[in-house]
Image: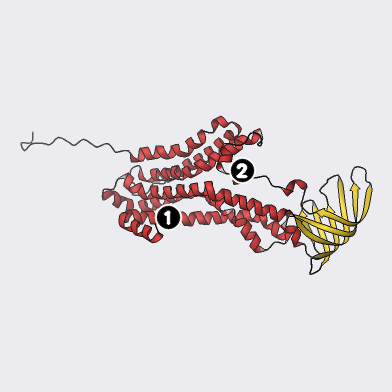
């Protein structure tokens, strides 16, 4: 089904009132989710400015790296923005008396809530798509890209007459660089071994990449090592030497983070490869991916319940929206506390899906249950008795 045919079906089969409300909900959802995710991206990207300043990376590389974080930000804020949109769009409809007109036209609470439910289902589907596929792949690409920048790419960006900080424990200086890649006047401060600080000098060298690891072949130089325990200076003069520019041996390979692991590996971790203290954390992360999209439905139902349930007030009612906001804040705090305790005690993991879906089911059951019919007064005959 193409987008045009889907739009035609939507116009022909969905009532005008539902299209009107759903259109407002979707536009508000896109605007609020995009704006909040962009704000978080802008704040978090400041942590990576040092990669541009210290390592001389281009603005393009900076944007490519930090843009891989956007799907994660969208997945985090989507349940909150779904609630906010559902609450305030319906609150505006109530304030403009549009809900009153719809009720007077005979629309039931379920009919009034259908556009909000459709918006919540769209958010839920998008949440599953993000949590189960897009976010893990984007996180893996981000970690891999960051690893390459920190351990490989910076080594190829050595600038003439500049002290380039390859890592926190290594700084390289070159006096000149020829067109064929030969380096001249090389000075290296190597502090990868805390007890043996080394200063390496070389007349010239050439940069190579072996197995994705940057190496420099040094010619006609010396290696001066200070033993910090004894204060003794050892000097080695060499004709040719090879130096690894990665920050340490352990950084030549990268361990996967929980955010980039497949769902199966999180829910069924290998007990032989994973530490006992990390098993609970990985299982909680797996269940968080499965249940976080369900909170889009639950939080939206809290907002719909607050607006559509209760007696209409012509002067407005701030208590119900405020109560809905406090309820969602409490649910967010409860989910965080539950996940924290479940990572230490896996017996509490069933509470994670329970707290994610139960509030929405309770609100839906109360909101959509049929209202009791008032008994009609007995019909009187013509005599008046």
Rendered position, 360 above or below 100: above
Rendered position, 308 above or below 166: above
Front-most of 46 and 181?
181
x, y (%) of residue 256?
65, 45
Mark identifier at residue 26:
1
x, y (%) of residue 26?
42, 55
In the displayed structure image, the side of residue 230 where residue 89 appears, left or right? left
Residue 50 location, quadrant: bottom right
In the displayed structure image, the side of residue 100 where residue 328 appears, left or right? right
Residue 348 location, quadrant: top right
Q: Residue furthest top?
A: 347
Dot 1: within a 10 Å radius of its alpha carbon, few (fewer than 14), some, or many (20 or more) residues? many
Residue at the spot of label 2: 258
**Secondary structure of residue under mark 1:** helix
x, y (%) of residue 30?
47, 56
**Secondary structure of residue under mark 2:** helix
Circles 1 and 2: CB atoms closer than 8 Å = no
Q: Residue at x 40, y 43 (%)?
A: 306
The N terminus, quarter of image: bottom left
Front-most of 205 and 13?
205
Rendered position, 88 above or below 349: below
x, y (%) of residue 258?
61, 43
Front-most of 317 and 84?
84
**Gap in angstroms between the C-alphas marked 1 and 2:** 32 Å
Q: Is residue 297 visible?
A: yes
Q: Residue furthest bottom?
A: 179
């Amino acid at each position: 089904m193409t987008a045009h045919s889907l739009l035609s079906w939507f116009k022909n089969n969905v009532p005008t009132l539902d299209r009107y409300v759903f259109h407002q909900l979707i536009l508000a959802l896109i605007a609020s989710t995009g704006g909040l995710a962009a704000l978080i991206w802008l704040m978090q990207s400041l942590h990576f400015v040092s990669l541009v300043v210290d390592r001389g990376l281009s603005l393009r590389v900076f944007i490519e790296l930090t843009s891989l974080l956007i799907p994660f930000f969208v997945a985090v804020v989507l349940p909150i923005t779904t609630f906010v949109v559902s609450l305030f769009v319906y609150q505006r409809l109530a304030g403009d008396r549009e809900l009153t007109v719809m009720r007077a036209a005979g629309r039931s609470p379920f009919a009034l809530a259908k556009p909000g439910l459709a918006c919540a289902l769209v958010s839920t589907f998008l949440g599953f798509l993000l949590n189960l596929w897009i976010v893990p792949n984007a996180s893996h690409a981000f970690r891999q890209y960051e690893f390459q920048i920190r351990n490989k790419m910076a080594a190829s960006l050595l600038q003439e007459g500049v002290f380039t900080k390859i890592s926190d424990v290594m700084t390289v200086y070159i006096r000149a660089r020829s067109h064929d890649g030969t380096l001249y006047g090389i000075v290296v401060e190597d502090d990868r071994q805390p007890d043996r600080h080394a200063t390496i000098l070389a007349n010239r060298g050439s940069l190579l990449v072996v197995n994705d690891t940057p190496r420099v072949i040094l010619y006609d130089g010396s290696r001066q090592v200070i033993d910090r325990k004894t204060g003794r200076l050892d000097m080695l003069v060499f004709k040719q030497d090879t130096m690894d520019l990665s920050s340490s041996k352990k950084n030549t390979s990268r361990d996967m983070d929980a955010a980039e692991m497949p769902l199966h590996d999180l829910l069924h971790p290998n007990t032989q490869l994973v530490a006992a203290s990390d098993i609970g954390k990985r299982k909680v992360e797996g269940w968080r991916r499965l249940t976080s999209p369900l909170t889009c439905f639950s939080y939206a139902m809290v907002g719909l319940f607050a607006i559509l349930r209760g007696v209409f007030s012509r002067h407005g009612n701030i208590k119900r929206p405020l109560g809905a906001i406090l309820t969602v804040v409490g649910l967010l705090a409860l989910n965080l506390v539950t996940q924290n305790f479940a990572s230490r005690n896996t017996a509490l993991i069933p509470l994670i899906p329970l707290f994610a879906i139960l509030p929405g089911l309770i609100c839906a059951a109360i909101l959509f249950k049929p209202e009791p019919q008032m008994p009609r007064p007995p019909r009187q005959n013509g005599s008046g008795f």
